[in-house]
């Protein structure tokens, strides 16, 4: 009788789900004549890196290669992936880098990913690394140590000025996402991230997507 390690099975299931979500189209869009078209996407675990860290991981002069363009203009999932190494050599392989490069490196995980990795991570806005743990990142050309920067990116909504006016919000405000599905729920306090070129899009992570049965959801609505 063959016994499978539960941790390995769970990791394989998470990897399969991440690949499915990554390869899905632009997300679940809901709109109408009286409201803007809302796109809701599930954001699987991923990494952001500086150009310096990219070269340490993949070699001098290396540039990110777009694998799939994301819904927000100018942003993409890269071909490059890294292995994330936590305490006691627990690892999550094939964590995809999102481009373009940033002025900081960080890892964004769901809570279940963090548990598998052996880390206790805070919920933070991207770039806010206070009180966050670090990890090792391994690429084909080398390894780097992040002293901090492993976070759960809080659920949020990208929004442009016109849609912000429609909802009566400004950058830094909060909205709630009402989801109709077999597991209907309201996800509260989505951070509003307004920028002139942003398109209306909600980002939730894989834990939240599973909790609301995202693949079978029939309606999404933003409310104050």
Image: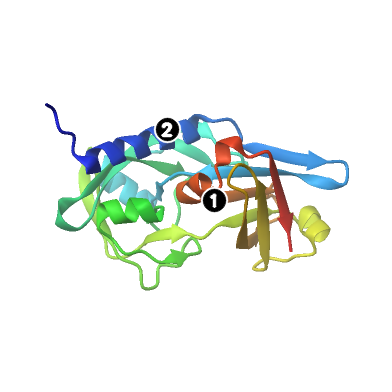
Q: Which image quadrant for residue 149?
A: bottom left
Give the labeled residue for mark 1.
204
Q: Residue at x 39, y 38 (%)?
A: 63
Toward the right, the furthest residue is 34
Tell me the residue at 52%/46% (across/down): 209
Toward the viewer: 191 or 193? 191
Q: Position of residue 129 (x, y in %)?
A: 40, 67
Residues under labels 1 and 2: Cα distance? 16 Å
Q: Could one spot residue 139 in this view of the protein?
A: no
Residue farthest toward the left in the current orientation of the protein: 1
Q: Helix, strand or loop at disc 1?
A: strand
Q: Residue at x 76, y 58 (%)?
A: 164
Looking at the image, residue 154 sits to the left or right of residue 163; the answer is left
Label 2: state its secondary structure: helix
86 lies left or right of 199: left
Where's the N terminus, which quadrant? Answer: top left
Display colour scheme: rainbow
List the residue tagged with mark 2. Answer: 19
68 relative to 16 in the view: left or right: right
Q: Position of residue 88 (x, y in %)?
A: 15, 56
| Residue 212 screen position, x and y as percent | 56, 47
At x 45% / y 65%, what residue is drawn? 123
First along the sequence among labels 1 and 2: 2
Residue 210 visible, this orientation: yes
């Amino acid at each position: 009788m063959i016994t499978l390690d539960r941790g390995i099975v769970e990791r394989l299931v998470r990897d399969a789900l991440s690949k499915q979500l990554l390869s899905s189209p632009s997300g679940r869009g809901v709109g109408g004549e009286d409201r803007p078209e809302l796109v809701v996407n599930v954001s699987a675990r991923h990494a952001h890196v500086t150009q310096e860290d990219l070269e340490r991981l993949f070699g001098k002069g290396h540039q990110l290669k777009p694998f799939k363009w994301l819904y927000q203009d100018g942003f993409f999932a890269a071909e490059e992936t890294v292995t994330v190494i936590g305490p006691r050599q627990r690892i999550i392989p094939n964590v995809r880098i999102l481009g373009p490069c940033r002025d900081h490196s960080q890892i964004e995980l769901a809570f279940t990913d963090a548990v598998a990795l052996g880390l206790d991570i805070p919920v933070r806005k991207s770039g806010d690394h206070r009180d966050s743990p670090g990890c090792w990142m391994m690429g084909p050309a080398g390894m780097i140590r992040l002293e901090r920067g492993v976070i759960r990116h809080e659920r949020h909504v990208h929004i442009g000025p016109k849609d912000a006016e429609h909802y009566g919000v400004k950058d830094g405000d909060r909205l709630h996402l009402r989801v109709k599905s077999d597991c209907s729920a309201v996800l509260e306090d989505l951070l509003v991230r307004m920028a002139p070129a942003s398109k209306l899009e909600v980002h939730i992570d894989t834990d939240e997507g599973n909790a609301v049965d995202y693949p079978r959801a029939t309606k999404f609505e933003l409310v104050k």
